[in-house]
Amino acid sequence: MKVRKIIALLLAVVMITAFVAACADDPVDPVEPAPADPVETPEPDDEDPPEIDDQPADPDARPEDNGGTFTNITETRDVEPLGVDPTRQNTMIVGYNVAFEGNGIEGFTIAAYDQTIWDLLHGDVRTVPIRDPGGLIYINRRVIPNFWVHDDDAGNRTYTFEVAQDMTWSDGTVISAFDFAASVLWQAAPQWNAVAGATFESSNYMELLGWQEYNSSTAIMSEEPDDWDEEEYGPYTPEVLEWILSDHPYFEGVRMLNDWVFSLTISAEHLPFFYETSLVGVRPVPAHIYVPDMTITTNDNGSRFDGDIQDRAHDIASNFRFNPTVVAGPYTFVSFANEIVTVARNPAFFGDSHGRQPTIDFIQQIIVSHETDVDQFFAGEVDVLPDQLEAASIERVIANPDFNVHEYLRFGYGVVNFVHYFGHSQDVNMRWAVAHLMDRQAVLDAVLGGRGSLIDTEASPGQWMWQARGAEALATMRPIAVSIESANSFLDQTDYRFESDGETPWDPEQANAQGTYLRHNSEGEPLVWRNAAANPAIGEAIFIETVSNAAYAGMRFENEFADWVTIVMPLLNNPWDMPEDERIWDSISMGWGFVAVFDPFQNWHSQWNGTSQNPAFSDAELDEIMVRMRNTDPEDLEGFVDAWFDYVVRFNATLPSLPLYNNMWMDFYHPRITGMSAISDLSSWAASVTSLGIAD
């Protein structure tokens, strides 16, 4: 389907005007929501997107799958060294309030501050997604000049990709189909999942044919598996390992056809899928680094590495992960020391989807404090301060004519993430009680100066679905507004409905602003809610605006700044590893970004319980809706919006997290930095780096 046809269908969906109202069975009467402040959408760039025909080649003309054993192409091409020093004249310095964590490759959860470096190192050298201005995705025809789509009799769909033959890694090694196929085999392999911290259920490419058999095999570990039965199979000897490897599972949905062509097959059981092409999105890995001297065999069973990758997986996770010296993106990794990340322009870069090359020689990402970041910016120590939202800082910069501000809609929102795996937030009544105690508008006004709007569900005005039916969804959902009476009604449905003796009913008439009259549970434990704040200013505003309301509901509300690396990331990803005495948190106030592929199944479906993707939240109705969303036919935009509508309404009812606000991002930058207008809600400064420059 051509891009213009997709956009035409999208416009048809946006014109839907049907209005539906529904009310949930609520324990309290809903209160009227305060009118939301409008958020203006910035004007689009003058530059048109590239003309790309998204129609695949004739499937009957696709290359034949002859199979065989393939060796990685290790041919190298000359790469001219950069040949300059990282002096102030050709270096852009970007400041963030949170430190870079260090994850430089796929397979690990990364924060937004790592994502920027990640985008610089890897760019858009991948099959998909490339995003158009509407947020839809299509094949990257600069990387994949030809592709074919073919359905077999069983309904499985195969995408066959021809890789461009003029791409090289930063060390000059040729990028071939081997690097793409190796990437899929690597990321789905149980050995990699084990060292990368992923679990059996949370691997990439699970929708491809044969993923289950390939990913679940523990017998191909070089070390003896925990469940190896010696009585049945005998000792786990090298000879046994060799025999197992001779017959270990192939990945049926992955095939190499020749040095420049590979294919991926989506299983019929996962079709239709609304964002179908995202299922075959592959970013290559430098196979000469990951699996040197290893071959890939392809036959009727699929593909596999001819050997065990366990030792290599440990090495990549322990070393290359933090020092990715060979990359394909616009910049190469130089160093990460003293909380400063330095990258250098990659002379071997293939070019972005427009064919553009970066012009800035060096980029450094540094950490700056909330208290001094604007002062450092004015002093010239920092060229760019991205993602600013605090009104006090914004007003200072706007008032200074010597500096520039670029404003655009945030593709995401501020949020209070509830910690579902321990603590009070496991109970939906607790979550709704906190929602009614938190004055979100006051937080928006105090910190952001009113630059934004309130939102009552997981959504952003920048999403095309919201533009189609967002107003209707907002009118259908339970409004989230301050109401101590409502909070008390919810809390009365929890075990925290007693005085300190655990028997006498708690009396709201005795509550006071000092918070000396607290609710207790039947065990006599007081109700204390602890919030970890990733942003000190936002956390402090939440505390100030919530603590007195909470006191009148018999709750002591506490807030503490939480370091991103040591507290926030463990809470989000691996809380079961936290020591018992550190499991004190009920919520985390932070930011949350969306991506073009809106698939909440990956975050909230109960299938992921016990994994870093969704440790504990579960709701059967939301599960069903999320599956329905992803199983919508790609051409049925109206059907997807209908399912999305049900999703945001149910999200509001269950509150897996508490939305705070949508807002505008402000990027502060010196006049010496050019091209900042290319940055938008769908393209950060790092993703737009080929448009940026430094003025003479």
Image (tube, rainbow, N blue to C red):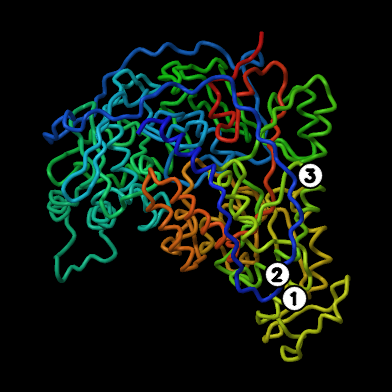
Q: Amino acid at mark 3?
A: Gly
Q: Which residue is mark 2?
A: 433
Q: Position of residue 162 (x, y in %)?
A: 26, 27
Q: Residue furthest front?
A: 18
Residue in the foreground of this view, choosing between 624 and 126: 624
Three-letter code for the amino acid on which mark 2 is drawn: Ala
Around disc 3, counting alpha carbons within 10 Å, would you say few (fewer than 14), some (14 to 19), or many (20 or more)? Answer: some
Q: Which mark identifies residue 488?
A: 1
Mark 2 to mark 3 CA distance (whole Å): 24 Å
**Element under label 3?**
loop
- Kindly identify which numbered label has been placed on residue 450: 3
Which of the 4 image quadrants contains residue 382?
top right
Vertical relation: 191 (above or below) 558: above
Q: Is 407 in front, or is 192? A: 407
Which quadrant would residue 79 be assigned to in this image?
A: top left
Q: List x then y, in percent, for residue 678.
A: 59, 24
Q: CA distance from mark 1 to mark 3?
A: 29 Å
In the image, residue 224 sits, relative to residue 8, either above or below, namely below
Which amino acid, by three-letter code, is at mark 1? Asn
Judge by depth and name the residue closer to the eye, 59 or 267. Answer: 59
User: Which class describes the residues within 10 Å of circle 1: few (<14), some (14-19), or many (20+)?
Assistant: many
| 179 lies above or below 231 | above
- Identify which residue, 189 or 277, lies in the foreground: 277
